[in-house]
Image: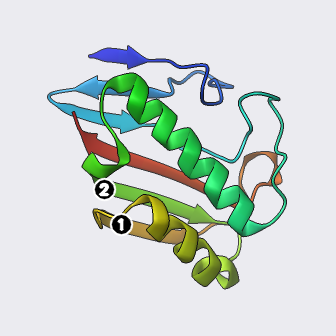
Amino acid sequence: MNYIKTDKAPGAIGPYSQAITANGFLFTSGQIPINPATGNVDALTIEEQAHQSCKNLAAVCEAAGTSLDKAVKTTCFLADMADFAAFNTVYAQYFTCNPARSCVAVKSLPKGVLCEIELVAEL
């Protein structure tokens, strides 16, 4: 196993890693829309938050030597399923390889954000 850490994405705020590589795959922790430059959630709308979450994931992928194009599975968490269509429009801009995906609504997310995304990607 190899632990992945980059300052281009939010650092772990608990006892976990941004990502781990193992057996030719990258396994990321969920990325919420924290701006790594400020440490804050600057984005307000679901579209802005989805963009920031995807950018954070892309940075973790890059640090591991892979990219969003190598994603094989994503799991998306939404605070409100009414945001699904808007979230999906942004998501489709980043995940053009159409990985397998689960998308679920949850009661709440850390820091009151609207979305969180995690992925598994080939190295």
From where the camera sits, is residue 29 visible? Answer: no
Q: Measuring from the top left, give residue 19's x and y in whole percent.
A: 43, 28
Q: Is residue 92 toward the left or the right of residue 79 in the image?
A: left
66 and 10: which is toward the camera? 66
Residue at left offset 55%, top offset 76%: 89
In 3D space, how far apart are the residues under numbered discs 2 and 1 (Cα atoms)? 5 Å
Residue named by callout 1: 101
Q: Quadrant of residue 122?
A: top left
Q: Residues within 10 Å of mark 1 (few under 14, many from 20)?
A: some
Residue at left offset 31%, top offset 15%: 2
Mark count = 2
From where the camera sits, is residue 100 visible? Answer: yes
Residue at left offset 42%, top offset 37%: 28
Q: Quadrant of residue 112?
A: bottom right
Q: Is residue 94 toward the left or the right of residue 114 in the image?
A: left
Q: Secondary structure at mark 1?
A: strand
The N terminus: image quadrant = top left
Residue 18 against residue 76 in the figure, above or below: above
Q: Measuring from the top left, give residue 38's x and y in whole percent.
A: 82, 29
Residue at left offset 50%, top offset 61%: 76
Q: Measuring from the top left, give residue 33's x and y in whole percent.
A: 69, 47
Q: Measuring from the top left, give residue 9's x and y in whole percent.
A: 60, 30
Residue named by callout 2: 73
Q: Amino acid at mark 2?
A: Lys
43 and 119: which is toward the camera? 43
Check whether the beta carbons of the residues at disc 2 and disc 1 lie within 8 A of each other: yes
The C terminus: image quadrant = top left
Q: Quadrant of residue 114?
A: bottom right
Q: Is residue 82 toward the left or the right of residue 24 in the image?
A: right
Q: Amino acid at mark 1?
A: Arg
